[in-house]
Amino acid sequence: MHLKSSLNAIRCILIHLKLVENASMKNFWRKSPNVRGGVKMGKLDHKDSVYRYTLLSMIFFAYILLRLLMFESMSEYYDYDEGTYLLIARLINHGYLPYRDIFAVHPPLYYYLLAVWLRVFGDNYITGRALSVFFGLLSLIIAYYIGKEIKDWKLGIILSGLLALDPLLIQVNSLVFHESSIEFFTLLSVYYFIRYIKTEDEKYAYIALFWVGLGSTSKFTILPYALALYVLILFNKSERIISYLHGAIGVIFNKRQVFILATTYLIMILLVMATVILWPSWYVRAVVVVPGIHRIVYWDQIIPIMVLLVLWGSLTLKIFNCSYLPQVKDMISFSLHNLKRVLLLASAFFLPKIIVEGLLGIAISTDYLSQTYLIQGGRSFPIINFFIFVSDLFEDIYKNTLEFWMFILPVVLLALLVLAIWAFSKKVPMSSLGKSLLVLSTITAFMYFAVSPSIITGRFILPLLLLIHILLADVLYNLPSIVQKGHVRTLGFFLVLLLLVADFGIVYQYPHGNLKFIYAVHTKTMRDDLRDYLSSADIALGTTYSLNPMNTYYLDANTVPYYIDAFGLLLLEDLNVSTMLKILKEEGVEYFVISTWAYYNWVNKEFRDQLRSFASTVRMGSTLLYGESYDNKDILEMYSRLLTHNSAGPLYISTYNGRVVVWVNSTEIANFYAVSNNTAFNFRTQLSYDLDKNDYLAVQYANASSSVAFRLLLNGSQLIFLDVPAALVFNFTGEITVFGEDKFLKLGDESNSPVDVYCGDFHLLIGGKDIKVRKVSNNRIEIIGDKIILELRDH
């Protein structure tokens, strides 16, 4: 049933695109009276078709294979969004409505499409990801027809091949992300935009704007592209304004810009040098920087950014002897004289928004606009976001973390190709429609970098990257006009080889944690371990809350619908943690799950502190049921409010970085792991609460197969270790003083009797049965004993 429904949807799109193609072919035959030899042409067409569809089949196969290779992988660092969308879709299918019953920060279309998809094909994360694969497959088909519209089927093959092998698209097509729908709606609008430019038929302009308007009801990161598309369609009726835009493109993408940029940056470097020499304060060094080269972290750095832009703009206007005020005046005048067209084109864009967002957003909740559009406004700032993006790219060079560049690979390849062509004093080959798309791409880039307040990442500027893909395909197709075909084939081979290397990085190295991307490689293992523990302990989950919604979704647990998006509520809505926890308890939450995502070192300190506060409050107010962590800081913990074991503290335990952590209330004082025969068992740690014995089974691993196990009992101010088969190494958070056998222990000293350990404001008594304590360093001790008792004393 899955396959049949998917094929029917693809068939509908193919039929529609085929009708447009047939209409074009009829016009072609009418305009080509010299065509002869029908039978021979038919044989050639058949051979041509076989070759064409063989290539398409290979591209589709590569597309499916590369996405399926990532299908089952999980990582806390990206599946927060997946879990949020999947959980919202599941709740929709249970009668809850976004914006009223569920706090949701994106427009409604994708949520409801996903809900329908899960209802039809089954509610699990694999099925959810299949929707993204389906959207990507439709996009691949549209890309093929875009190439045919620009030139012929060969360009369609090149474009669809580039999209199938693009690392960023492999990632977004493999996950439950909005971006696959954005890819689909962007390419569909581009297709009709090209039809409009070719035929000058107004209906295609309205269709293009309708599709991009519908795409904006999925996620508003498409809006800068939508605005660029609207502007270009609006002014396409004015040859003078179009000539202005082409002229501007000629100025921006010009060989002389290389020298203008070099001159601008050299002047900027000298200005920064002089400023630092004259006023060598901390503030000046932090704020007065060379934008793009130095990292942008302060709002005050807008000053050097504006200086740089003024320098570049002045040099450009002077060298090219151009102006812009008369052109702006012409655009305003044209808009005022064509007000009806302005409004009609706008209505084509807003019609789907009014229908979808009106019915599924505004009509549902008066908070719709504040939850979606208004709440996102302060996440970044126009112009600054561009230089943050560029400085991050330079930082990747400094740190040799260039794997991050794979997500902007089409930009790098196109830039390299253009610079190489310029180096040989050639003109960049491009079709007439490609030039129109270049104008659209430039306006789109301006909207993203100079108008939109959104954060700049590959995902969020996907429409712009798709346009660059089309430009790259167009230039590659036209290369034989200036380069020998043999050289073009060689270039094509190395281009495919480079893409395949990047694809190997995204489908293998990335999920295995071998690259510098943050990736929680043990995420799925830990979630499956937690499910196994719950099953073995015969625990039926009640209402559960996880800071990462994917945990709640994967465990198939009930939750409090409105509060599933902790990121949106804590960071964007500024909800206080104490208020949030109070509400969750009032709503009957019985279990809390805290995992890797919550412990990540987020750049936003306030948000980071909020998450730490949440975890600390839960730890002291609930009982740890299960905890697991690895030495790469992957972690998963479940707490129960139903159990009152050790609820008063003040000692608590958790697990982090492959070790057991000891807390005094909310303060970490030490962590420990077992050591045997010089082997440290700190690769992985599991803590499982035994409901019958009221203690913990602690299992610590040196590697995937070698482990030691012992039992832990928490009793107020005591932590008791039983059946310990190896030495335990305690690492304290500060310098320690150890007193035993009537003396202070120095480094290497041992004591066979109880010792007092002083660390900061805390005093611990360590005793037990047949124990031996050795001071290893200024903050570390080693303890051996079958039974060890750690007791917190009043200092």
Image (cartoon, helix red, strand yellow):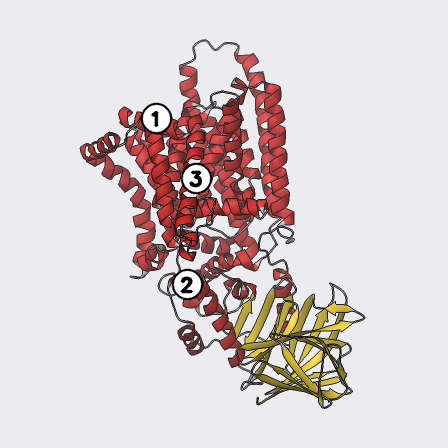
Q: Position of residue 765 (x, y in %)?
A: 66, 87
Q: Position of residue 792 (x, y in %)?
A: 61, 87
- Identify the residue shown where x is 49% and y is 44%: 135
Q: Nearer the viewer, residue 553 or 769?
A: 769
Q: Position of residue 136 (x, y in %)?
A: 51, 43
Whole-number angstrom distance, CA of label 1 to CA of label 2: 46 Å
Q: Which mark is residue 464?
A: 3
Q: Nearer the viewer, residue 623 or 2?
A: 623
Residue 369 in sight: yes
Tag 1–tag 2 contact (CB < 8 Å) = no
Name the quadrant containing residue 686: bottom right
Q: Which mark is residue 571?
A: 2
The disc labelled 1 sits on which kind of residue? Phe
- Identify the residue shown where x is 37% and y is 25%: 198
User: Within 10 angstroms of label 3, few (less than 14), some, or many (20 or more) residues?
Assistant: many
| Mark positioned earlier in the residue sequence (1 or 3) | 1
Q: Which mark is residue 320?
A: 1
User: Within 10 angstroms of label 1, few (less than 14), some, or many (20 or more) residues?
Assistant: few
The disc labelled 3 sits on which kind of residue? Leu
Whole-number angstrom distance, CA of label 1 to CA of label 3: 27 Å
Name the quadrant containing residue 228: top left
- Relative side of 752 to 49, left or right: right
| Mark positioned earlier in the residue sequence (3 or 2) | 3
